[in-house]
Image (cartoon, rainbow, N blue to C red):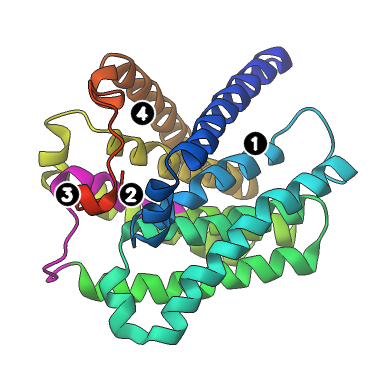
Amino acid sequence: MLPSTAFTLLWSLALFTLAFLSFLYILRCFLHFNMVKDEFLHHVGVNYLFAPWISWLLLLQSTPLFMPGSNYYLALWWFFVIPIVALDIKIYGQWFTKGKRFLSTVANPTSHLSVIGNLVGARAAAKMGWSDSSICMFSLGMAHYLVLFVTLYQRLPGSDRNIPAMLRPVLFLFFAAPSMASLAWNSISGTFDNSSKMLFFLSLFLFMSLVSRPALFKKSMKKFNLAWWAYSFPLTALAIASTEYAQEVKSSTAHLLMLVLSTLSVVVSLILMVFTAFNTNMVLPKDDGLQSPSDTGSPV
């Protein structure tokens, strides 16, 4: 419903923001290489290295500049996917070779970012008609999602290594992965079939399971934290999946669900922008904030 000019402006703003943040991180790689190395070796920090490539792939899928089948699209897809595959080999290779004891130690909700990276790459490949490549990345992501889901399902309730209360918003990543898987399979199959519906219903169930327990997030909401941004992407992915579902089934209930989730996604994103703008001291503290995980006990 947005005019094409408004969409182009929003996309351009997202592109500028992502490019600026990427440039800052490139500077960090040159000026503070030891910190980047610590993040790469940290069981939580390494998962956030998927975030920029996920963001670039999402922007690529929605670009108004060229079509998915163009040479530019193909070249950029390879450029953004190769780092994801390299990180997959590092992370999933450790899971495979070191066994379930290692996985149960390092697995955490942010590990879903590695799965989401594969699913976003699969959807981007399906957009340009690369069926085999999209199925390859989809199968890789879903196989490890099942392993990760079972591991976290068994570990989180009674584990002594539960995530800190301030970081509990990352639990929303539990339903981000099946939401993105639903969208990826929709692009691969060309229709929102039963497999896409099952993944969408799973994500909707996980979403309801989390929002029905507000006490779980009570402590994390007392003071603004950048971890709050973990609410936005999962809600957006779920809202987009609900849109595809509503277009397929064409029922009033599905359209109402789409409207509710889409509105919630937009409102949450706007609120996060406002809170971030009024809490710049949390984003840019008085000191440089450049402390290694070894110094702070947690990733930067």
* Residue denoted by label 1: 59
Q: Do tag 2 and tag 4 residues touch (Cβ < 8 Å)?
A: no
Q: Secondary structure at mark 4?
A: helix
Q: Position of residue 111 (x, y in %)?
A: 39, 61
Q: Do tag 1 and tag 3 residues touch (Cβ < 8 Å)?
A: no
Q: Residues within 10 Å of mark 2 (few under 14, many from 20)?
A: many
Amino acid at dot 4: Val
Magenta segment's dominant SS is helix
Report, in whole angstroms, how far the alpha carbon at label 2 lies from the one at label 4: 13 Å
Report, in whole angstroms, how far the alpha carbon at label 1 lies from the one at label 4: 20 Å
Q: Quadrant of the C terminus?
A: top left
Report, in whole angstroms, how far the alpha carbon at label 3 lies from the one at label 2: 12 Å
Disc number for residue 213: 3
Q: Do tag 3 and tag 2 residues touch (Cβ < 8 Å)?
A: no
**Left or right: where 174 falls relative to 33:** left
Amino acid at dot 1: Leu
Q: Nearer the viewer, mark 1 or mark 3?
A: 1
Q: Secondary structure at mark 3?
A: loop
Disc number for residue 171: none
Pick whichever of labels 1 and 3 is earlier in the sequence.
Answer: 1
